[in-house]
């Protein structure tokens, strides 16, 4: 009879049935789980907050006390030696890895060939993995053109793309002429160093034998192209202005950016050379070299021009690689870092906790889970309350500390927050893939660069018109999260008391905008 009575009270209407089921599971199941999630997210927020405040304090002290690289390391301008001649200058190899870089291949080749360094003490090595015969021919012709001008440039190809960029760089280091080189500068296909690049970097390596790497800062030539590139600039400027500066000044360690840096070849070889076990071969090499006791130097005042991805598709692929790779490397190297005997305990803690765990795992996961899933869910479950310090104060301080690296874009702060929250969806997914070593963990899609392609094609107005193939542009993940946020916003507007609906509506709109691809630069069909 009890069973019969319990079934007879169930309403026939579907919506009422859903409401009944929700009321039955909310208190015993949903409320405890959501409270655990809130506590978990608040702990991660505190970890991020402490990390940001710490780095803010350190970078302030660095600026106040003027700890410039020239004061921390020996640096002397290189001078001609009448007796030794050009042999007084170290031999430098410049590697330029590229893959089907139709629009920008000539930029890095031209910039490398224009470097001011004794011509008989520099070798330009173009590592072309292009699969398009036309592009491969164009790159080879460009190398021949510079060779005819007396530049020592080598055009190298291989019969496969094993290991992608890491494989190309590793193969390039096997060439016999590389044995005579002391240092190697690495430039991606869209990077354009100034002529004095080597004069400002090599002396640090020459006079400081403990240094393995000198890293330059990136300067974005297309940061004003669209709103999406402005958002990227805000994120990356914090990385260069704060994260790398702090790492260089305090621990003499930071992640190599994969380009615009000069390595001591002996340090590179001692660390085991290039490995393709993850999609962040640059970070992998940096961590291994650091574990061998080598130090790194970051030159924030030395800027190398390059291009930001200006299409949403290209940016998504790049962020997947940048988020998945570090998480996967963390999984592979955590034990190796902990058991290393050549570095101090303090440096181990910095690399494992600060560099990997907080920045590469917690920051991505917490941004999405807390602000896009858990916080909106508390609207539906009023029994769970998020303290104001966790929902408002800490996120506000973290945001302001992140944005301080790009003062010119402070008026775009709200747009940046919304954009970063949407991108945290892809970063979280990629981070989890990397930690679990799931499918797509080693996916490598070269970031598309446009160079001057848009200028060379039709007028600017035509280039900004979106293509109407909606099916190719809809991103279902963003769409799903957008509807979830919109639903939570409507519920809060009708029944809630904490007025989250303003944020939820705006954030839902941001997810919808990116879901339909209405962000970034639209490339014309012809």
Image: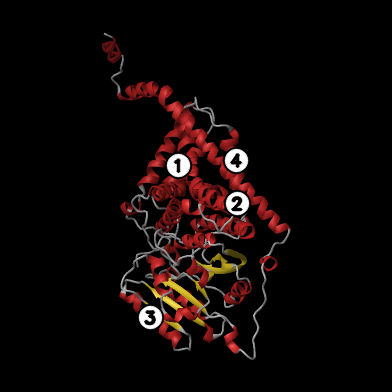
Q: Nearer the viewer, residue 144 or 58?
A: 58
Point out the tag, 3 or 1, that comes first from the N-terminus: 3
The location of residue 122, given as percent across then percent down, is: 51, 82
Is 400 displayed left or right of 519 in the figure? right
Would you place residue 238 above or below residue 187 in this image? above
Q: CA distance from mark 2 to mark 3?
A: 48 Å
* Location of the C terminus (image quadrant): bottom left
Label 1 residue SS: helix
Dot in front, 2 or 1 = 2
Point out the tag, 2 or 4, that comes first from the N-terminus: 2
Count of residue discs: 4
Q: Which residue is mark 1?
A: 508
Point out the tag, 2 or 1, that comes first from the N-terminus: 2
Q: CA distance from mark 1 to mark 4?
A: 22 Å
Q: CA distance from mark 3 to mark 4?
A: 54 Å
Would you place residue 304 above or below residue 177 in this image? above
Q: Which residue is mark 4?
A: 394
Q: Which residue is mark 2?
A: 346
Please report the residue visible at 63 percent of the width from the left and 47 percent of the height from the top.
Answer: 53
Q: CA distance from mark 2 to mark 4?
A: 27 Å
The location of residue 19, given as percent across then percent down, is: 37, 23
Label 2 residue SS: helix
Label 3 residue SS: helix
Please report the residue visible at 43 percent of the width from the left and 50 percent of the height from the top.
Answer: 331
């Amino acid at each position: 009879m009890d069973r019969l009575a319990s079934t007879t009270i169930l309403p026939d209407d579907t919506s009422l049935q859903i409401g009944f089921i929700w009321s039955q599971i909310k208190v015993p199941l949903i409320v405890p789980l959501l409270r655990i999630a809130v506590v978990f997210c608040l702990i991660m927020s505190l970890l991020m907050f402490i990390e940001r405040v710490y780095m803010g304090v350190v970078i302030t002290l660095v600026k106040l006390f003027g700890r410039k690289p020239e004061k921390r390391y020996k640096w002397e301008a290189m001078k001609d030696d009448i007796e030794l001649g050009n042999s007084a200058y170290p031999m430098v190899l410049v590697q330029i890895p590229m893959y089907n870089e139709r629009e920008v291949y000539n930029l890095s080749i031209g910039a490398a060939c224009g470097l001011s360094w004794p011509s008989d003490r520099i070798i330009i090595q173009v590592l072309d993995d292009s699969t398009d015969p036309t592009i491969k021919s164009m790159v080879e012709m460009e190398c021949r053109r510079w060779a005819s001008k007396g530049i020592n440039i080598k055009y190298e190809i291989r019969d496969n793309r094993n290991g992608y960029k890491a494989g190309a760089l590793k193969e390039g280091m096997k060439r016999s002429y590389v044995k005579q080189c002391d240092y190697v500068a690495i430039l991606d296909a869209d990077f354009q160093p100034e002529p004095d690049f080597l004069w400002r970097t090599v002396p640090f390596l020459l006079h400081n034998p403990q240094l393995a790497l000198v890293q330059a800062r990136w300067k974005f030539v297309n940061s004003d192209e669209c709103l999406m590139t402005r958002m990227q600039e805000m994120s990356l400027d914090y990385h260069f202005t704060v994260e790398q500066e702090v790492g260089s000044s305090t621990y003499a360690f930071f992640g190599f950016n994969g380009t615009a840096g000069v390595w001591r070849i002996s340090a590179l070889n001692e660390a085991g050379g290039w490995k393709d076990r993850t999609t962040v071969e640059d970070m992998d090499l940096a961590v291994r070299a650091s574990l061998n006791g080598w130090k790194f130097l970051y030159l924030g005042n030395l800027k190398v021009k390059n291009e930001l991805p200006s299409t949403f598709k290209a940016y998504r692929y790049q962020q997947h690689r940048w988020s998945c790779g570090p998480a996967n490397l963390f999984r592979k190297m955590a034990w190796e870092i902990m058991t290393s005997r050549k570095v101090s305990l303090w440096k181990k803690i910095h690399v494992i906790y600060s560099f990997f765990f907080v920045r590469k795992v917690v920051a991505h996961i917490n941004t999405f889970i807390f602000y896009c899933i858990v916080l909106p869910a508390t609207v539906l479950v009023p029994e769970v309350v998020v303290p104001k310090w966790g929902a408002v104060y800490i996120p506000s301080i973290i945001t302001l500390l992140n944005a301080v690296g790009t003062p010119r874009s402070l008026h775009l702060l709200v747009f940046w927050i919304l954009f970063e929250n949407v991108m945290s969806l892809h970063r979280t997914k990629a981070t989890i893939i990397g930690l679990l070593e799931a499918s797509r963990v080693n996916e490598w899609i070269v970031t598309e660069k446009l160079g001057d392609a848009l200028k060379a094609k039709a007028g600017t107005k035509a280039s900004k018109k979106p293509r109407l193939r909606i099916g190719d542009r809809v991103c279902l993940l963003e769409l799903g999260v957008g509807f979830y946020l919109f639903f939570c916003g409507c519920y809060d507007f009708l029944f809630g008391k904490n007025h989250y609906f303003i944020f939820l509506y705006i954030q839902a709109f941001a997810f919808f905008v990116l879901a339909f691809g209405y962000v970034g630069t639209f490339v014309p069909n012809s």
